[in-house]
Image (tube, rainbow, N blue to C red):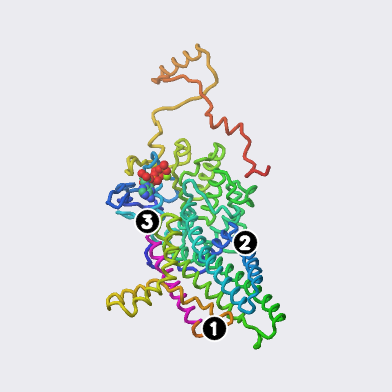
Amino acid sequence: MTPAALPLAIEIKNLTKDFPLNLRGVKLRAVENLTLSVPEGRVFGLLGPNGSGKSTTIKIILGLLEPTVGECKVFGVPSGRVDSRLNVGYLPEAPYFYRYLSGTELVCFYARICGVPRKRLDERVREVIDWVGLSGAAQRRVGTYSKGMLQRIGLAQALVHDPRLIILDEPTAGVDPVGSAEISELILKLKAQGKTVLITSHLLAQIEDVCDRVAILDRGKLILEGDVNELVGQRDRQALIVDPLSPEQLDELRGWLAARGHALNAVEQPRARLDQLFISRVSRPDKGGQK
Amino acid sequence: MNATTGGVPFSFSRLLIVAGNTFTEAVRQKLFNFLLLLAVGLVASAQFFREFNFGSSELKFISDFGLGAMVFFGSTLTIAATAQLFFSEIENRTALTILAKPIWRTEFIFGKFLGVFAVIGVFCALTTLLLAGLLCSRENSLMALHPDAFPNGRLIHYGDLMVMGVLQWLKFGVLAAITLLIASFSNTNLYTVVMSFFMLVICHLQYLAHDAYAQVASLPLRLLVRMLGYVFPNFQVFNLADQVAIGSGLDAGVVLRVAGYALVYIAVIGGLAVYSFRNREI
Ligand SMILES: Nc1ncnc2c1ncn2[C@@H]1O[C@H](COP(=O)(O)OP(=O)(O)OP(=O)(O)O)[C@@H](O)[C@H]1O
Ligand SMILES: [Mg+2]
């Protein structure tokens, strides 16, 4: 199925955003002539170096900023309108919440704003807090949370009304490898439920693991867009991982391959990735620190 | 951000949720703790007046002093709390998360206003009750000491004192709306506080310009002053304190007119704040 055949969750056309820098009319072009569509049900990664306009694009999608030129639609509704946000959950970068509320109160507040029915409110709030692994700290004031815990409560807040589109701006910034792996898992779970996810991150390994499709921005311009498999997959090569072979066996294998017209390109010692090592050794988080 | 009728109708309950959250935040920031200090100060100064033994005019003293303290601290609280509660949303980036939900900016701004208005309401209610208590206890003891100074019974109109408290509350509401309007387009908390105090002074003193120019100036200047008189609310109209203690009592018609005056200004200034906030980039 080509992406064009799917209904679009986000549709951005010829979007340009200028920020006025001073009163003399000097402007900073944060996004330039960007055209981008995110098909429904996909996990879409928006990549780019610092200051390339990722967060600005996201804020325009959410109607927090007005585009200078161009248009942006969410599920077919222009993004300035209130109803374009009915089915959207958003986690801002480096979130920071009402410090005087407890985790439960905070999620409850956002749930009520989104119109989660009163009957299901408590249950739903408990459910999402459990989902992001914060049940142990749910009664604590948000002001006492660590950076990673803030990201998690932000995630809970973004998911509480069960939106169809979830926009995550650097969800793994400041989260430890175990936590990022959990967030990746969560994103895959959301995808399995048929949700659309738009995610920005500087952890390319993570993006590669969860995203179906990526776009790369540089200084506000789109420089590359495509399916992850097409972009990084090496179709014409394969890797085999085997038990250690002696030099004679290796020569035998070379001969066997040569007889069939193949070449052995490389013999390497595979290494465990440091993050996998970390995850296997570090204790799973105790759901928010009941120590 | 335009007022096109999207699928989401304006919701008063969402507005109340924002207001409730604002109120909770104010309470948990311990904004009310300073009320305790204020109470101690009022009681102590009432004690101090007693030393001079003014007789019945002592009551007028206490009442003037109490209402003066209420105006002073109330204005400060209004400006500081409004600016703080608004900018905490901007600076903590909670405005981003909340405005990314299906909520009208109108609901957000009026929710903020209502939250602050409730905070000031609690302040006004408590100070008015405290003042009434002080006056009542002192009046009782004075009546026992000099019965001849009270030929017609009590001198203080307690009901009017309560009405006065409500009028002050409405005035602070106008001030909160002004502060919110300034906050809606300014970038910093400090700028908002300074500008709001400046506006407070103008609103208190504009009647002077009005009086001074009403007779002497040429017609265009007179019209200008008159127009400014409409642009800036005149806070002097809320000053009915003289009639409360040992006065003739409040006139119901005047009270209603003053209350209406406040509500109209709150609605108009609040509307302007919404308009300016709609175009703000968060
Ligand atoms: N309110 C603003 N006023 C002026 N310039 C801004 C504003 N917001 C963003 N910019 C500028 O727009 C450009 C894009 O910023 P943006 O936050 O979108 O980058 P980003 O891709 O999210 O970067 P990062 O990876 O660091 O989060 C930057 O040069 C930034 O300085
Ligand atoms: Mg960013």
| Residue located beneath label 1 in the image | B250
Q: CA distance from mark 1 to mark 3?
A: 58 Å
Q: Residue at x 53, y 50 (%)?
A: A154
Binning the other alpha carbons within 10 Å of mark 3 as few (below 14), some (14 to 19) or many (20 upward) gives many
Q: CA distance from mark 2 to mark 3?
A: 54 Å
The kind of residue tagged 1 is: Leu
Front one among A238 and B25: B25
The kind of residue tagged 2 is: Leu
Binning the other alpha carbons within 10 Å of mark 1 as few (below 14), some (14 to 19) or many (20 upward) gives some
Query: Are discs 1 and 2 both within one chain?
Result: yes
| Residue located beneath label 3 in the image | A73
Q: Nearer the viewer, mark 1 or mark 3?
A: 1
For residue B37, the mark is: 2
- Labels 2 and 3 touching (C-beta < 8 A): no
Provide residue A19's location: percent of width, then percent of height: 33, 50
* Element under disc 1: loop
Provide residue B276's location: percent of width, then percent of height: 38, 63
Binning the other alpha carbons within 10 Å of mark 2 as few (below 14), some (14 to 19) or many (20 upward) gives few
Provide residue B142's location: percent of width, then percent of height: 68, 79
A131 left or right of B222?
right
Query: Which residues are the magenta region?
Result: B255-282
To which quarter of the image does residue B67 belong?
A: bottom right
